Each structure stands twice: as structure tokens, then as C-alpha cells.
Image (cartoon, rainbow, N blue to C red):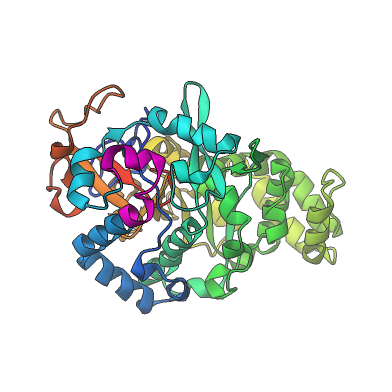
Amino acid sequence: MCLSDHALSHYKRGAQAPEIVTLSHCLPLQSRSIFISSFASNMDEHKLGYKGNDVLQDLEILTMNAKAAQELILRKILEKNHGTEYLNKFMNGSTDISAFKSQVPVVTYDVVQPYIARIAAGEPSSILCGEQIVELLRSSGTSRGEPRLMPSISEDLYRRTYLYSLIMPIMNKYIRGLGEGKAMYLLFVKAETLTNAGIPVRSVLTSYYKSPHFLHRKHDLYNKYTGPDEVILCPESEQSMYCQLLCGLVERQHVLRLGAVFASAFLRSISFLEQHWCDLVSDIRIGQLSSNITNSTCRLAIQSFLALPNPELADEIEAICSSESWKGILGKLWPNVKYIEAVLTGTMAQYIPMLEFYSDGKIPLVCTMYASSESYFGVNLRPLCSPKDVSYTILPNMAYFEFIPLEDGRKLIEDDEVVENDTLVSLVDVKVGCYYELVVTTFSGTG
């Protein structure tokens, strides 16, 4: 099915994304304003540890029964949230699904922002959500010039972790031997603040990297990163980048996967490498971290990587980096790399030519998942396809999904345009060749 340039959740945005087969990568725009704390029956914590065929069989069963999964999720949404101030306005405490579909309007972020502001100021979460809101996730989207804040509950981390747990089993179907080396994924946290009520405000990725789900993850073969967690969590982004690149260079023969969350972040790191490779080579040559790295946690974490001088490795890297052209530099520095992973769709598509330059077109560019601050959505089941052909299979246990048909092809719904509830199409009723905008009712108040 062809979907639109945008997805819709609570929030109306203006970011463009490409036409693709199942769902484009972009941040959601509008949705019914509903909040939930429940956990879908097949999202139990023990399933997050599935590996290989087990998790893929679970995924197949889930998608084959998408209609039932969607009905279950919506039922739990209503059961958990029928008493909230917002939902009660429209349904008077009812948990009837048909009443929800006919009476609860599709809205933009601006409609629910006052409720979020009240919670941030100290009012109870129950005005909007049946569970305690534990953090507000800062979206890259804005409303009236301010970042959009997406309420999040503790169970959301399980859903994000579940989606992450699918990635390597899917990749392993197409590329064997990924567990025999390491990944140089350039991951970063951003600064966070507290609301007047003491609720953390941070990005969704910062939330995940600081969570026990990431820090206490099972360290199997597929979770071996070149950069230590302490370096990833360094709040000084350039110092973190320097140290992560240093670790990746030291481990260059063991690196099988390169990547970052977004293509822009990966290219920013390669540009940083172009500017600082001389310093990195010097550190490796003498076995001592540059004095420019002042973060004590980073310095301590890097000690084991620079235990001894390594002039031979330094010479190898220097010979590669000092070449006249950096075309194909990634395959030269990391000769065993099998693919580069990053978000490559939507606004990130503009970076594909530069990635192809640095890889000389010889390393597959892979986009594995579709996610946002508002909700996580789905995975790419054909990860080795061309970036322009990327499509995502929506996971029906992530949220409740509906679709607005776009009669004029790619023309998007305006912010002030009323969406009639009876025009919405369910996840299992979309038609191949048609264009839609996505309406999302999430578990955590982000859609």
C-alpha cells in the first residue's frame, strides 16, 4: 500500500518524506488524543529476549493477526483511560469501541498541549493518562516555535526494546556472520531538563540510552559495540564523538557494521573524522588520549583501548586518511564492514549521495526501522533494498493505527481541516496503490 509523505499522530507537522510501499519514515502528525498504560498481551518482558527464528516467528504470527491485535490494543486503551479528564469529555466513562470511533475527534498537538503543560506544571497525569507520566520526550517537531513534548509512561520502554529486538534477527536472514564482529554505531545523548513538577524532559534516544533496557542489555554477539556505554552517555557530544571514533579505529579489523540513528549524524561524524584524524592517529601511536578530552568518565573508559602504543596501526590509518580523495574511505578504514545502518528516508534521503561517495557505492545502505518521539511504528523486512525503495511493516502491537485517505494523491491534510471519523480506514483495510496519512492512538500519550 502506498502511504503519504507524512504520518499523523496527535500532531500536525510539515516535514516531507518519500513515497513508499508500506509506510514512510517521518514524524507523526495527528491522532486521537488518548493515553494508555497497558501492555499488549504479546509484549511480555520475557519475549524481549527472543533471538533468531523465535522472534521472527512471533512477528509473523503478530502480523497475520493484525486485526485482532489492533482490537485488543484499542480495547485496553479504553479500559485504562476511560476515567481521564480528556477522554471523559467525549465518552462519559464509556469503554465502547464504536463510541470511541464515532465520538473522539482526530486532533493536532495544539489541542492536547494545554493538558501536557498542566501536567508539566504539577497537575496529576490522570487528566490525560491512566498511568503516571514519567518523562516528556522532546520531539524534533515544533508547535508555535516550541519543541513538542510527548508524554511517556514506563511501559513505553518495553515497546521500544521489543522493536529493537527484531532488527538483528531480520538482518541475520540476509547477512550471515554478523555476530562474529562488532558494530561501530555512533550514538549520542542530548541535554535534558526538568519541568517545574520534576518530570524529565529529554529526547527519546536519550531516554533509551540512559534506561536499564540499554545499559543492562544482554551482551550477546549482536550487542557488541566498539564504543563503551560511558562514552555514549558523555554529555559533551564532540568528546563523545572523538572517543567513539577512536574506539572504532582501534577495532577497525573487527568492525562489521557501521551506523548512527540518522544519516546526518553519521556524516557529521565522518566530517569530524576528516578534521581530527591526525589527532586520533597520534593518540593511537603513543597510546595516550589527547588532553583535549577533559571528561573524566571518557578518559577512564578509553584507557583499555590505549593500553600500549600501536605505531603499526597508526601508520595504517595515517596512510588511508592522508590520501588525496576520501572516496571509498569507509571500506578502507573498516575493510570487513558489511553494511551501514541509519535512517535514510524522508529528509535524510538528501544524505544518500554523500554516503555513497564515502562508501564508493560498495557498502549496502540499510534503513531498518521507522520510529519517532510520538511512537515506534515498524521495521523494514527487506533491509537490503535500495534506500529509495524502503518500506516498513507496521507492528500492530505498537499503537492503534487508522488512515486518512488522500484523494488528491500527495496533498496533505491541513492543520485546521476537520477530519470526519467515518472517513478513517483501519490498518487492515488500506488499499494497495492508495495514499494515506496516518492517525495514531498510542499507549503513552505521544500520539
Q: Residue 53 or 242: which is nearer the viewer? A: 53
Relative vertical location of residue 41 with respect to residue 109 in this rendering, above or below: below
Q: Could you tell me if residue 362 is visible in this image?
A: yes
Q: Position of residue 362 (x, y in %)?
A: 43, 54
Relative vertical location of residue 207 with respect to residue 417 in this rendering, above or below: below
Q: Position of residue 121 (x, y in %)?
A: 59, 34
Is 50 included in the stretch rendered in magenta? Answer: no
- Asked which quadrant contains residue 224, the reply is bottom right
- Asked which quadrant contains residue 176, the reply is bottom left
Q: How many marks?
A: 0
Residue shown at 25% from the left, 28% from the top: 412
Q: Residue 112 or 275: which is nearer the viewer? A: 112
Q: Position of residue 314 (x, y in %)?
A: 76, 57
Q: Magenta part of the protein: which range? A: 77-92
Image quadrant holding the C terminus, namely top left
Residue shown at 39% from the left, 38% from the top: 349
Is 90 included in the stretch rendered in magenta? Answer: yes
Q: Residue 401 or 92: which is nearer the viewer? A: 92
Left/right of residue 148 with respect to residue 182 in the rendered view: left
Residue shown at 24% from the left, 49% from the top: 22
